[in-house]
Image: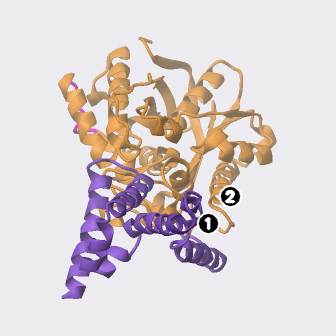
Amino acid sequence: MDYIVAFAVGGMICVIGQILLDFFKFSPSHVMSSLVVMGALLDGFHLYDRLIDFAGAGAVVPIMSFGHSLVHGAMIEANRSGFLGIGMGIFEVTSAGISSAILFGFLVAIFFKPKG
Amino acid sequence: MGKQTLIFNSPIFIENTATVVGPKEGEGPLKTTFDKTYDELYCGTTSWELAERKLMSEAIELCLQKANKKNQEIDFFLGGDLLNQNITASYVAREKEIPFWGLFNACATSMEALTLAAVLLDGGFANHIVTAVSSHFATAERQFRFPTEFGAQKPETAMFTVTGAGAAHVSKTKTKIRIEAATIGKVIDLGVTSPFNMGSAMAPAAAHTIKTHLADLKRTPNDYDAIVTGDLSRIGSPILKSLLFEENIDISHVHQDCGLLIFSPDQNVFSGGSGCACSAVVTFGHLFKEMKRGLLKKILVVATGALLNPLMVHQKESIPCIAHGVSFEYVHS
């Protein structure tokens, strides 16, 4: 059952992206940032955690969850260190994701050549 | 003649042409009509820009070889491509050492170059001119849309840029193919803003040029064995036919489109081929071969160009379009 819910919720997020692409004529970069902002907003209202409780992996995979993680990190660090913590914490939770993107991007660029 | 049409008094001929294309074109329905085919997009180089340059350089080389002409014997090289600052043509000109005119009218550059070549020859300013245009799928994607590595989705209305280059050697030496008249297009913009729907954007420009050409010369579509558009493809071609039909001009029985001729629909090319090279390699290869065999006596090639700039599109501007028509005539030799 968990798998089905995760699949359905993750799929729905992709459907939103596809609708933005096809009907609202967003560029791929706009779609990506819109989803990040949506995730951040939802987390701001404490709604995204509930979605994760419900859908599990369907909601924690990129890219909507990235917005959620940004807000999360900022909030946690803000609680600890006050106002400056917003800036310090924003990449705290997401740093593993960003570092691995850089690392794998680097490795792929070394070993492969685009075919066109 | 008329508003926008030139008729050349002295006979101007296509002495030789050459075409070099990439893998997908080499698998298409016109594969036997090209002079040289590469089976991968890098064409033996290390980058796509270098590959495009190689295609254009070789097209010129092959073209001049056919008449045993050396670069020094050519008065002018008229060329263009789709990349910023016309880099392909400029770098090819650096290596060829032929006096160079860099041209940009997007995919209409092929016919713009031939028209200017004919004007220069007719005016007596030159004896031998070589024109060349090129485009490359991956360089065009990077230039106008997204780098192919980005993996962005494309809608069905998008077109597939032809990888290739076409060169033509134009002179007064009598051959079977004469450049008889040319119509210079106006820039027309009916407000299409999507770089993935250039067929619709360009159709009104093509319609205007064809209509003006026929009116200026007091001809009808029946005077031509074929009226061939550059790259309107599956989306733009029906729009063109209906636009002209509204003006009481029926071209449906003679109309062909280079973007549809060069690929077959099962090649995953969205709505069809586009790019500078599209009209050039189809005209210089397939159409001229048909003319030399006497199967086509008179054709009007209308190369269509979307004067698209990604920056302007991001600033919500629409895409201005242009179409230049050149009429070629079969001459008994």
- Residue with the mark numbered 2: B50
Task: Kindly state the secondary structure of the residue where label 2 is placed.
Answer: helix
- Callout 2 and callout 1 share a chain: yes
Q: Amino acid at mark 1?
A: Tyr
The answer to whether residue B153 is visible is: no
Q: Amino acid at mark 2?
A: Leu
Chain assigned orange? B
The stretch in magenta equals B249-254
Residue A44: percent from the left, percent from the top? Answer: 36, 60
For the rendered model, the colour scheme is: by chain
Is A105 situated above or below B326? below
Residue B255: percent from the left, percent from the top? Answer: 29, 39
Is B10 situated above or below B197? above
Residue in the picture at 40% in, 44% down = B231
Alpha-carbon neighbours of circle 1 within 10 Å: few (<14), some, or many (≥20)?
A: many
Q: Is residue A32 left or right of residue B134?
A: left
- Residue with the mark numbered 1: B42
Mark toward the start of the polypeptide (2 vs 1): 1
Quadrant of the rendered image containing residue B244: top left
